[in-house]
Image (cartoon, rainbow, N blue to C red):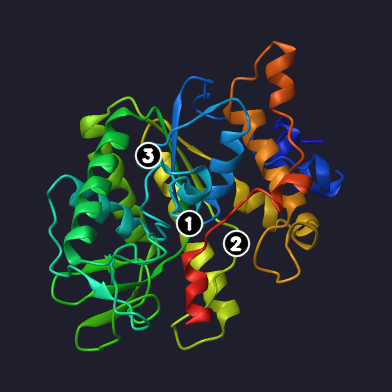
Amino acid sequence: MADNPYSSLPDHRFWRKAVASLPPFAIDPLVKTPFKIRPQDKVATAGSCFAQEIAHRLQTSGYTYYLAEQPPQGMSKDEALRRNYSMYSCRYGNLYTTAQLLQLIDRAYGRFFPQLDYWNRPEDGRFVDPFRPRIEPDGYATLDEMRADRERHLAAVRKMIETMDVFVFTFGHTETWRHKPDGAILQLAPGVAGGEWDPDVYEFYNMTVSEVVRDFLASVDRIREVNPTVRIVLSVSPVGIIATYEDRHVVESNCAIKSILRAAADEVSRVRPNIGYFPSYDLVTVAPNAGRFYRDDTRRINPHGIDRTMKMFFDHFTERARDEETIRALKFDIAAEAETNARIVCDEEAIESA
């Protein structure tokens, strides 16, 4: 046969060889990574609720999951868990959009001072932080208490940014809500977990590919201004959206959102060094796996899907230890663990309960 550009390509470049001819458990779309994570590296996490899966596995794997915002001395483990001290490396809750991440960094370093200061909860009148309204489950009794906790939180964010070795961020959404006077990005729509919906004060906005890329690259550049050696792992959440505010079917919006985020992740990983793409979305949604990896609600990932995606993460992004004790520690039974220990908090679910 005549020679052509595809003649000498490796097997993983061909669907028949890398997907169709393999059993589903053998499909592995991650070919190479720009770096490896060492057991002593401080790994910080943020993003949508799927990023919490990586955080949970790091905590049980022998690697260093970086908790920059620690619970107060004397607080019990159960109380710290209830008050979301281990959900992510800091108590910011889910950062669904890249705009939310960028503004968090700018608030932490005094580059942005939102006009919106607080919300009250309609059920009891207690104060909540409008940028993380569900982080304190009981709310705050006074405005001073809420502001003091916010300052501690932003100080912890600065500490995390300046001292982390690896930053794992998961793209989760493009639909967002903004405070009209200054464009402050909210985690949840007003009225869902505090505040009151007023179309004269708040507005819905849906981000484009270029805006997702712009805000994430700006976030990377700000982080590397103070921590130039940080390495970044980027992924797209395979968890479906809860609801859409666009005037269309939720399936159409979900497809559009995930396509935008996947395209943005591809662009970002090409234009900055030491940004590795972790294809959790690609593995979960490929045709042979989609029916196996989703729960009955067809939105969240089941224990088998988590097990497989995290095995891919540790196989490729980490330095496997040579001693048997550490290797055994890296082998965890997700099916037995997920239902009892994992506590994945999806702030977006408050939309349905509200």
Q: Residue at x 74, y 64 (%)?
A: 295
Q: Is residue 87 visible?
A: no
Q: Position of residue 223 (x, y in %)?
A: 27, 38
In terms of depth relative to the viewer, which is nearer, 88 or 210? 88
**Pointer 3: what residue?**
70
Whether tag 3 and tag 2 are in contact, CB under 8 A, the answer is: no
Gap in angstroms between the C-alphas marked 1 and 2: 9 Å
Q: Position of residue 348 (x, y in %)?
A: 48, 69
Q: Position of residue 112 (x, y in %)?
A: 14, 56
In terms of depth relative to the viewer, which is nearer, 168 or 256? 168
Residue 10's quadrant in the figure?
top right
**Pointer 2: what residue?**
239
In terms of depth relative to the viewer, which is nearer, 295 or 72? 72
Q: Position of residue 294 (x, y in %)?
A: 73, 62
In the image: residue 148, left or right of residue 268: left
Looking at marks 1 and 2 on the same chain, the residue that comes earlier in the sequence is marked by 1
In the picture, the disc for residue 48 is 1
Which kind of residue does numbered mark 3 sit on? Gln
Residue 11 against residue 144 in the figure, above or below: above
Circle 1: element type: loop
Gap in angstroms between the C-alphas marked 1 and 3: 21 Å
Whether tag 1 and tag 2 are in contact, CB under 8 A, the answer is: yes
Which kind of residue does numbered mark 1 sit on? Ser
